[in-house]
Image: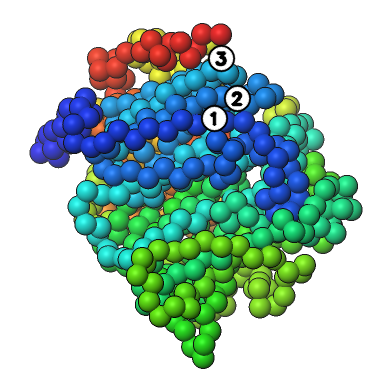
Amino acid sequence: MKMISRILFSFLAVNTVLKSVVNGKLIKHTFEIDYAPGHPDGVKSNWILQINNQFPGPTIVGTVGDVLQVDVINRIKDKQNTSLHWHGIHQQGTPFQDGPVMVTQCPLRYNRTQRYKFKLEQWGTFWYHSHVKSQYAEGLWGALIIHPQKPPAHKYDEELVITLNDWYHTRTSSNEDWYLSKSNRLGRTPFPDSILLNGRGYYPCEQAWERNLSCRKKRQRRHVFIAPRNKKIRVRLINTSSRTSFNFSIDSHSLDTIEVDGIDVVQPVAADVIQISPAQRYSFIITTNQSKAGKDRYLIRAVGILEPAADPDTVQGKCKNCTLPVVTAILKYDRKSQNSSNQIRNETEAYKDNFSADQLPPSPLLPNNVRLLDETLLLPYDKIVAPPFADQTIILNSGVIITDDGDRFAFNQTLFSLPEDEPILHKVVRGVALPSEFPYVTLQPFASVRIIINNFEAAHPFHMHGHHFWVMSKFPMRNDSNGNFLGFDDKLDGDKIKVSVVKRDTVYVPAKHVVVIAFYADNPGVWTFHCHIDWHNLGGMAFILNEAPDLARRKFKVTEEMKSICRK
């Protein structure tokens, strides 16, 4: 009872604060979204979704207590709908601002404007992206950095944001059609052509020309980050990919992780390589004191991990000499002995025509002596442990289902499809019952909730809107005497559950593994839980958390602004 009272008090206090803007400043942005041409990896694309003619989109920076106001204007010339989701932001008390189309809002139509406005109550590394089909794969995303009011948990001198994303030379609409086609068996996903780091990458022009694509070698430039010597640099790493995970490293530097998905950790965890899956974020500190024998340039590497395996023979044609996508950049120490500003300068340099041996590792496989980041050591700084018991338990079996329209990944053999008449949140706050066949679970107010995912098929990064959760356990499935894989069994697997564990909003689950996550249902609203391989989400790998609907009905109303967005 004490725990429930504490959560209730926290919920009421947060929502009282949300009604006022007195303790922070108002941060205003206007985002005009439209296609524009560019050469991110040397190959020309006329279909880059840009915000204010920027790709990647503008980085938003704020402080806890600030109010963020973003006016989004849809200028997309082929009249696509759009929206923005603020990834990792709980939207406590502001569920209509979450952004997924037909879940919390209607789509923002061509030549229409929508205002997103909410208070920044969390700090850390976040990002924003479209939540319409697989639209963000064409570039509609950006970083969101929120600083705490108090001193940071771990000291550093300067910071650098690095984004990683996979890139396609075919339009997203074509990739969507192919993925959803009847001919796509086993739920194969399109094969990315290249990888971009802060919007820049490399694709061999010779291969592009063979595919009748325009490619300019002069446009193939990589980032050079010039940092002051003997400083602690916080690197905020964000994976904005539609399907690719990465092994990320910086030559000769330890990556001392201090944050995971917007959650500070108790103490830095050292690693040589960080594996980061779609939608995940890590902050780590590097110390620029590694100079030896005059060396001041160090290679930054991100090697793609395509799991589940992609098929190169997709809509973009057969990929000659297909390899795992890779991108590089350079960390360069400032030649000056002291840089009084401590600022990191960003320049670019030309890629060589071909990657040489010193530019790329031979494969994404890691040598035995390399320290791969151990997620289980990333304990939350606040030291609050996961709920030791569950008021509600949800079991999700993840796998491929075979349909007449093609093979899809799904939970519990049920495909999620968006309603066409009215957003789900609008229905809930109006007291309209959701269809019984709809894939959702009603959560009781302030309940401790445990979700058990039996992942029978390919690897997936699962993301929950509206919450962070504790990853209480992750382990390989057992086999029965016939070799069949078995899901979670409380009697046999219960001892694997822990309460002092990593807390995050996106968890990577390998194939043939079980994961157990937990959270408190302290955020009334309608929240999506889905795979963040965007093609899987597009195909229906999602379900809805209908959280405390009675409370939501009493607290929220569909505003006139939200109604106006729904009017055609």
- Kindly identify which residue carries mark 3: 420
> Is 105 situated left or right of 183 in this image?
left
- Mark 1 and mark 3 lie on one chain; the one further toward the N terminus is 1
**Residue at disc 1, secondary structure:** strand
Residue 311 can be seen, yes or no: no
Q: Are marks 2 and 1 in contact (CB under 8 Å)?
A: yes
In the image, residue 150 sits, relative to residue 4, either above or below, namely below
Q: Quadrant of the N terminus?
A: top left
Q: Quadrant of residue 391?
A: top left
Q: In the image shown, does 395 or 125 lie closer to the viewer?
A: 125
Side of 150 where 237 appears, left or right: right
The residue located at (69%, 45%) in the rendering is 38
- Residue at screen point 54% across, 47% down: 240
- The x, y position of residue 198, in whole percent, is 56, 54
Tell which circle, 2 or 3, labels the residue nearer the N-terminal end: 2
| Corner quadrant of residue 51 | top right
